[in-house]
Amino acid sequence: MSDTTVSAIDIPVSAPTPVVSVSPVVLPAPGRPVDLQVRVSAPATGSGLPIILLSHGHGFSNHLSSLNGYGPLANFWAAHGFVVIQPTHLDSKTLGDDPSLDPNGPEGPLFWRSRAEDMKRVLDRLDAIEAAVPELGGRLDRARVAVAGHSMGGHTASMLLGMRVTDPNDGTEVDMAEPRIKAGVLLAAVGNGNGGADLSAFAAEHYPFLANNSFAEMTTPALVVAGDKDASAHLTVRGAEWHADPYSLSPGPKCLLTLYGAEHGLGGVSGYDAAETTDENPGRVAAVQRLTWAYLRTELYPEDRAWDAARAALTDAPKPLGRVKCK
């Protein structure tokens, strides 16, 4: 067993329980090119279950960017007490080549606005979701909702937490903050484009909505997770520090978890043995699983000191996997 795996195992977490996972749960979505498909993963037992909305990224694989991805996170969080709901956003390759799904069309690029609307639609349709999953009815705690997202999913989650986006088509400022969401986890999320100056030439051309992200209004508590080797040259000229912008440019309360040696996949959070992971590291994934779980437990249940215990275990490890700072 590697040193990194041992270090991660030292981070305390509750005992796992069996998980029920149901997909696709299809939510009618008038005005959307296709209905919204979600996966729901929930503990088989228990009541008063908190909710995590998990937004996928936009990667090279065909299925990780859909309700079928992010098993290492969804399965872990569900086994430790959360109901995890994963939508398939309109930029997913799994939806085919329908012209209405052109990522460069009117809703594009990457359907950045529609993605946030998907998450709000999920919250609007929790009754239907409960009814579609056997024995889930009446077991959700709708007052304890968190959002998590990786990469482009981090952009989606940031919008729901209060980040403002300037629409490149008309220059209007888009505010999609969602008050039903009480906490967030941003995994390798995008930073501020600084008017486009901090974007790569590719991102400036293809993703102009990244040019002016404002974190000044992102007031909802969040844990920002960034790899210190996540250069993301296809997106930014600033290097790895760009992914820490959601922490450094937003007001508190926020925490920043910097993972040593981690690249954009953060060890492999988007899928099991995924070929697109450039820094595959099971110990690093285990650390992300446990630290994000602990953070959300304490944010949603302030009397639960899981986050304090997890931070102490990370800091006290003989070879720490990363560092945490908070404000």
Image (cartoon, helix red, strand yellow):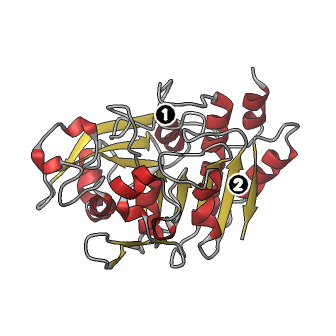
User: In the image, what residue type sits under mark 2?
Assistant: Ala
Mark 1: secondary structure: loop
Q: Is residue 217 left or right of residue 10?
A: left
Q: Say which of 216 and 86 sits in front.
A: 216
**Which quadrant of the figure has residue 301?**
bottom right
Going 64% across and 29% down the picture, which residue do you hit? 281
Q: Which residue is mark 1?
A: 18
Q: Say which of 24 and 173 sits in front.
A: 173
* Residue 80, image x, y percentages: 56, 43
10 Å neighbourhood of mark 2: few (<14), some, or many (≥20)? Answer: many
Q: Is residue 245 left or right of residue 320?
A: left
Indicate the quadrant containing the N terminus: top left, top right, bottom left or bottom right. Answer: top right
Mark 2: secondary structure: helix
Q: Say which of 257 and 133 sits in front.
A: 257
Going 59% across and 57% down the picture, which residue do you hit? 242
Can residue 48 be seen at all in this image of the molecule? no
* Residue 132, image x, y percentages: 24, 46
Q: Say which of 179 and 194 sits in front.
A: 194
Indicate the quadrant containing the C terminus: top left, top right, bottom left or bottom right. Answer: bottom right
Q: Is residue 83 above or below residue 32?
A: above
* Residue 288, image x, y percentages: 62, 43
- N-terminal-most mark, 2 or 1: 1
Q: CA distance from mark 2 to mark 1?
A: 21 Å
Q: Is residue 202 left or right of residue 224?
A: left
* Residue 58, image x, y percentages: 38, 44
Q: Is residue 261 above or below residue 161?
A: above
Q: Is residue 314 above or below residue 119?
A: above
Q: Which residue is mark 2?
A: 306
Can residue 58 be seen at all in this image of the molecule? yes
Q: Is residue 80 above or below residue 198?
A: above
